[in-house]
Image (tube, rainbow, N blue to C red):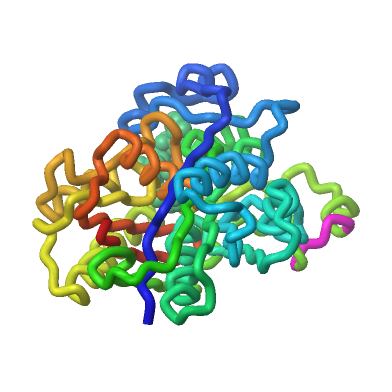
Amino acid sequence: MYNSKITGMGMYVPDNVVTNKDLTSLMDTSHEWIIERTGIEERRHIKKGDGNTTATMGVKAAKIAIERADIDKNDIDLILFATLSPDYYFPGSGVIVQQHLEIPTCPAMDIRNQCSGFIYALATADQFIKTGMYKNILIIGSENHSGGLDMTTRGRGVSVIFGDGAGAVVLSRSEDPNKGILSTHLHSEGQFAEELALIGPSTNRWVPEILEANDPTDISYYPNMNGQLVFKNAVVRFSEVIMEGLQQNKMTPEQIDMLIPHQANLRISQFIQRKFGLNDDQVYNNIMRYGNTTAGSIPIAMTEAWEEGKIKSGNLVVLAAFGSGFTWGSALIQF
Ligand code: UT7
């Protein structure tokens, strides 16, 4: 068995900053409400015509990760693309990335696990590398939320939270048994599938059917979230899945050098921090600046933490996520 380690990371967010104050001109909300309930100060939104899509943002992040990994793009054996907002209904965004990177052939696969998508992709890549099947895997988490949010008072419970952006890592084969991904832990609970979901258009509600109904009250094409239920489950599942990873590796919370939680809500991250007795310098948060970028949030945060010198060789880094599905997961990484 081989080991797998992160050899390069990159991130990209659109230039267009949308502050809480900007949102007050679109809907009945306030900077104070958003800060108090979520910790978000601003987020990035793609601007029409700026050339950004879910895949192209992923490409920008990927190019940085590939350069830092010091490999040729043609050495990539597999592309894994995590998103809930793919460029097209089909094909997936992984092949669009391949097209833009001009990699003639290699497998490209999309992972549909929303906020946990990056951890699901990392776990998938880890298996391919540990078994010796692939040497270098490009993993991208990217979201274009802004174009599909209800930016009116009706949608304020969801739309103030989400932002656009992408992060990427290169995961490579390593023969050092003491470094790399120690373990990954994945869970889902489908009974809550519709509690955070975008139901239509879909194969349950094909577009012609929606157009024919011409129902102005039908807002099934906007994401729908039972915020309080998601919040309550998130704090429980985050805690469980971090503890599961620590226990499997016979470690304790004090050994965590950096916890990078999926940036769902600053209140959730702070709850987890208190629960595990971690200091401010043991938890990385950037939701204040980017909002919740779903599959993009962990690779964006991990890249920033690394760029700021907060992840160093020898550090134990814990990633954890919870979201739509419900799905959740964690990864323990020895840098
Ligand atoms: O990454 C995926 C996972 N997602 C999450 O983890 C999200 C988890 N949930 C949450 O973070 C929180 O539930 C929210 C931040 C989404 C909402 O906070 P909340 O404290 O649960 O608020 P609420 O939905 O219970 O709404 C409280 C009040 C309501 O007004 P009334 O009925 O009390 O008069 C809402 O209409 O706040 C109102 N409200 C707003 N007011 C101003 C909801 N959204 C807004 C808003 N601005 N943007």
> Across the whole image, how many numbered discs are drawn on residues?
0
Q: Residue at x 12, y 43 (%)?
A: 279
List x then y, in percent, for residue 276.
14, 55
Q: Residue at x 68, y 48 (%)?
A: 101
Q: Classify the position of the N terminus by image quarter.
A: bottom left
Q: Is residue 207 found left or right of 293 in the rendered image?
A: right
Q: Nearer the viewer, residue 256 or 27?
A: 256
Q: Is residue 136 found left or right of 104 in the rendered image?
A: left
Q: Is residue 179 among the parts visible in the rendering?
A: yes
List x then y, in percent, for residue 126.
43, 70
What kind of secondary structure does the magenta stretch mostly adopt?
loop
Q: Classify the position of the C terminus by image quarter.
A: bottom left
Q: Residue at x 61, y 36 (%)?
A: 146
Give, as a single range, the part of the protein colored magenta: 204-208
List x then y, in percent, for residue 35.
34, 29
Q: Nearer the viewer, residue 44 or 182?
A: 182
Q: Is residue 294 among the parts visible in the rendering?
A: no
248 in magenta: no
